[in-house]
Amino acid sequence: MTTTPQVTQAAGTPLPRGFRSAEQGWPRLDRIPRPSRRVPFIGDVVGANVRSPLQDSMKLAAELGPIFRRKGFGKEIVFVAGADLAAELADESRFAKHVGLGVANLRPMAGDGLFTAYNHEPNWQLAHDILAPGFSRDAMAGYHPLMLDVAGQLMASWDTSEAAGKPVDVPADMTKLTLETISRTGFGHDFGSFERERPHPFVTAMVGALTFAQRRNVVPPLLSSVLLRGAEKRNAADRAYLNHTVDEVVAARRASDGGPGDLLDRMLEVSHPETGERLSPENIRRQVITFLVAGHETTSGALSFALHYLAQHPEVLAKARDEVDRVWGDADVPAYEQVAKLRYLRRVLDESLRLWPTAPAFAREALADTTLGGTHPMRRGAWALVLTTMLHRDTAAWGEDPESFDPERFTPQAVRARPAHVFKPFGTGARACIGRQFALHEATLVLGLLLRRYDLRPEPDYRLAITERLTLMPRGLRLHLTRR
């Protein structure tokens, strides 16, 4: 039986690219629990479902505890699910973002974009410094009217469905909404999503790329060329379409007399304030793809889960609607400043993100040799995958009934009473989501508008099911509407 060689990297030397199995960085794996039914040469595949690897890992976390490991076809991964260990991994002096698993599988599409860049790649810091002002308060206030306009398109579509007595497909409509919002506010491009019967081809290509990245996680490397041959061709076509679409958006802006000072303008025209360096054309394409994909896929999921829980909890819905009516009053549309005043509705959104963070995990790697939890030695470059879904269910932080939906968990008093680093829907540290305030403003605004306009009723027999494609989305969620 062959074993993976132990790799120790001297501080400052580049770590090897590609997947690094746990044996390379965790010298005492024997201290970390694993499933009992490991199959030789194959791994911990008994009972596993390739369509739900996250939910499989959640079940194992409930069985094995706050740290455990899984192995499949030579890939051994350490998972962290407990709040104390996750808090250690959030320490930026000891750990940094690790680009691995599905995130690395997205690099053929997004390259060194903000989400998929390796820590040593200089374009991450360059792009972050150039684009961060695009999410300032003044910039956000400038996006607000466009967000309202796109929400108006959604409500016009929902009015038509309501008048016809038809339920609405929540995930599909939230995807249309969030794609139009990020594309119009960030890049001045209208995909015309609400004029289409079927999803825009950009969405189809994006879903294909995300699904392919997920499949790459669970298919044995030696069999991927056979099992994924057809999928590889489709993925290449999906990537080509995404690139072509973005190239057209960028070319149109370059040919214009100037844009509104949005994210695309910053990419094309702004230099780094200290070095004067500019983003290259190739990196601009990668950043635009990153924002269009990540900027709408996660928010659409967050909105969909929140609408599910609101419809399932009429008392919460009524309290949230009363707040909207009280805070927004008779104004036709809310002002930018009024959205942040919906504090209870924001708690609803946070609680939905607690139960089902649409980016359900994040990976962290050791900056130097260290010991996790006083028990588990890690070499420099050793990494672990934090299951955000289980971190958000740790009873030590969230009480004895963490599966229940309760927005009161996010009252100011409750938040202050909890340990730090137990709520991480946007990742952690310097590499946390740059657009989190954009997403929260958009989602709170849209939920407020929908609650003010409609009564929401679930389909009687619906039970929440989860679609996994790196991000999470409710499957088959439809709601019935009644205009108020």
Image (cartoon, grey):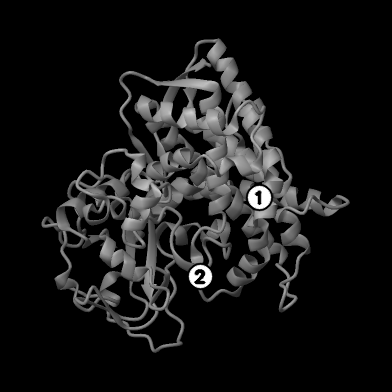
Q: Is residue 132 above or below residue 14?
A: above
Q: Is residue 298 above or below residue 170?
A: below
Give left or right: position of 215 versus 452. left
Q: Nearer the viewer, residue 326 or 9?
A: 326
Front tag of 2 and 1: 1
Q: Amino acid at mark 2?
A: Tyr
Residue at 48% from the left image edge and 42% from the top image edge:
343
Q: Is residue 291 above or below residue 276?
A: above
Q: Amino acid at mark 1?
A: Met
Q: Secondary structure at mark 1?
A: helix
Tell me residue 147's x, y (percent).
65, 39
Residue 22, image quadrant = bottom left
Q: Are marks 2 and 1 in contact (CB under 8 Å)?
A: no
Identify residue for label 2.
Answer: 118
Tell me residue 377's x, y (percent).
24, 79
Q: In the rendered image, is residue 273 in sight?
A: yes
Residue at 33% from the left image edge and 53% from the top image edge:
218
Give left or right: position of 283 versus 439. right
